[in-house]
Amino acid sequence: MPLTGRQTLTQYLIEQRRRYPAASGNFNALILDVAMACKAIARAVGQGALAGVHGAQTGELGGNSINVQGETQQKLDVLANDYFLRINEWGGHLAGMASEELEAPYPIPAAYPRGSYLLVFDPLDGSSNIDVNLTVGSIFSILRAPSGDEELSEADFLQAGREQVAAGYALYGPSTMLVLSVGDGVDGFTLDKDLGEFMLTHPRMQVPPSTQEFAINASNSRFWEAPVKRFVDECLAGKSGPREKDFNMRWIASMVAEAHRILTRGGVFLYPRDSKDASKPGRLRLLYEANPIGFLIEQAGGRASTGYGPVLQEQPTQLHQRIGLVFGSRHEVERIERYHAEPQAPSEPNPLFCERSLFRV
Ligand code: F6P
């Protein structure tokens, strides 16, 4: 390993490719294009207010621009989406892309050759953290495109997470990192800004099977289902409760940063299905949030679930479908699945209608 004593992302990809002598090199070129998009986003995020990219994007009618999810788009959401599209559309590796920021799939323009992969991404996850200078990231998933010349359709993207060829994320925090799985474990790279290269710094990342740390947005507790309430209550009860140990709680509001913490030191993350909004069975998006993070967590020996079963087995029905997601240290995720599988205790009796209450029945 010349130069710095560390392997570069390019060297790493070449070594991976040697396992498949027939490979064309298209896949490696695609990952390097994705990495380039992430470097461009890292530069914009790092310049912050100096680059004039903070704040909400203005829409055509003058107000804030709202994306397909009904969320206010930040200027950096739009810029990051554009970097992903422009840097990945020309290379001939892709048949199409889909993004959190675009309602419909993005077919490769006719001016460029069409390739054999699909790229699905959330260009900037946790974007409510941009203006407060906290960690955000990009999440991506690579799928195989259908062979043939037919026009690309939304249905081509609706593949279960198990079908992913590769997945990863970039983290724009105190340092910029790229964490990647090409289906053979998980490896983490740190951007050397002087060389402009991602260097392998976190080989073979593993999620410890047990943990004493959990992450959930507790302001939603009144909307949670009973198994989630039970899990959190038991963690909060600490040493004196049924778990007989104290837990620590975290919430960054940037799933990609929570995933990185969990890949580094373990923990469990929950954004479960809840009853907050009947039109949204969960907050996170299956294709470009839950699936790629689930793939990485499983490749690192952890577990990713809807609470009811492995998230990677879910058959998507829509491009922007939302889903409940629980991931992290295996023992905790298995416990949460067990709680979902157990018959639920009848709900607490209403005290107004109990024996000796005001309204006896
Ligand atoms: O869009 C997804 C996301 O920003 C995640 O990164 C994060 O975990 C979650 O939403 C934050 O949700 P809330 O606003 O409920 O804290």
Image (cartoon, grey):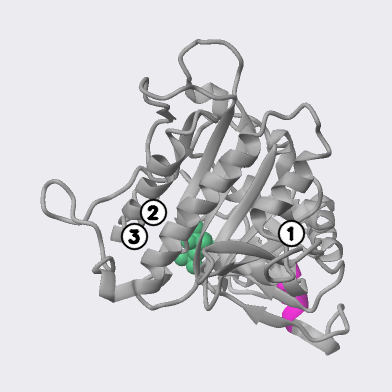
Say which quarter of the image contains residue 109. Answer: top left
Residue 39 seen: yes
Q: Regarding mark 1 in the picture, which secondary structure is present there?
A: strand
Which residue position holds label 2? 80
Query: Seen in the image, is 45 located left or right of residue 170?
Result: left
Give neighbour class at mark 1: few <14, some 14-19, many 20+ (Cα, 10 Å).
many
Mark 2 and mark 1: Cα distance apart in space: 23 Å
Give the number of the disc on residue 187.
1
Give neighbour class at mark 2: few <14, some 14-19, many 20+ (Cα, 10 Å).
many
Q: Position of residue 288 (x, y in %)?
A: 55, 45
Membership of 292 in magenta stretch? no
Give neighbour class at mark 3: few <14, some 14-19, many 20+ (Cα, 10 Å).
many
Q: Quadrant of the C terminus?
A: bottom right
Which residue position holds label 3? 76
Marks 3/2 in contact by CB < 8 Å: the verdict is: yes
Residue type of the residue flagged with mark 3: Leu
Q: Residue shown at 59%/70% (left/top)?
A: 352
203 shown above or below 321 = below
Looking at the picture, tell me which residue is in the foreground, 170 or 214: 170
Query: Seen in the image, is 127 located left or right of residue 144?
Result: left
Query: Seen in the image, is 155 located left or right of residue 14?
Result: left
Q: Which residues are magenta?
A: 231-236
Q: Regarding mark 3 in the picture, which secondary structure is present there?
A: helix
Q: Residue shown at 46%/51% (left/top)?
A: 37
Image label count: 3
207 shown above or below 64 = below
Q: Mark 3 CB in 8 Å range of ligand 1?
A: no
Q: Regarding mark 2 in the picture, which secondary structure is present there?
A: helix
